Image: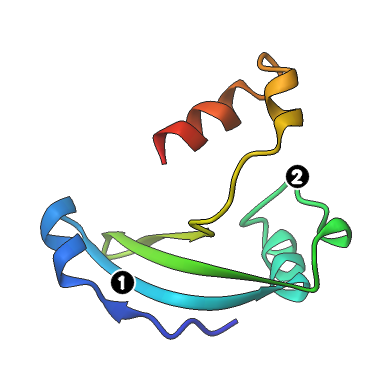
Amino acid sequence: MEINAQFDAESSKISGKIIFSCERYELSQEDIAEMKKKKLISYVNEDTLPRTITCQVLIFIEDAYKARVMFFDPRFVMPLEVFEDPFLNKNLIEWSQHN
């Protein structure tokens, strides 16, 4: 997996952290399987996902040894099924509202 990200001076200034961004990235099922294998993500069934997911990427530099990578689609809307069981999906709903 190779992400061609650019330094985002404006976001870095606002957040107080060094941030890099990539406006368009094709996240593949193989990328997700690789992240699961390295235990970077869990609870994702890549078999049910499309072959590729077009998304944006933000990379937050936490410190000299740690970076947080966020893949997201700004057009994504939570399916109504998530809201049918708010107790089970509480963390997902709160995260979605926050971001």
Left or right: where does residue 81 sit relative to residue 10? right
- Judging depth in this view, the residue of 70 and 50 nearest the camera is 50
Q: Residue 9 location in percent, x, y?
A: 15, 71
Circle 1 residue:
20
Q: Residue type at mark 2: give it.
A: Tyr
Q: Which residue corresponds to the image point at 56% horizontal and 28% vertical from the top-left?
A: 93
Report the residue at 67% width, 64% height from top.
35
Residue 74 locus on image (x, y percent) = 48, 56
Q: Residues within 10 Å of mark 2 (few under 14, many from 20)?
A: few
| Depicted 7 relative to depicted 70: above or below | below
x and y percentages locating residue 2 in the rendered image: 54, 85
Q: CA distance from mark 2 to mark 1?
A: 26 Å
Query: Which of disc 1 and disc 2 is earlier in sequence?
Result: 1
Identify the residue under disc 2.
43
45 vs 65, left or right, is right
Closer to the camera, 49 or 81?
A: 81
Residue 17: % across, % down: 19, 57
- Determine the residue located farthest toward the top in the rendered image: 87
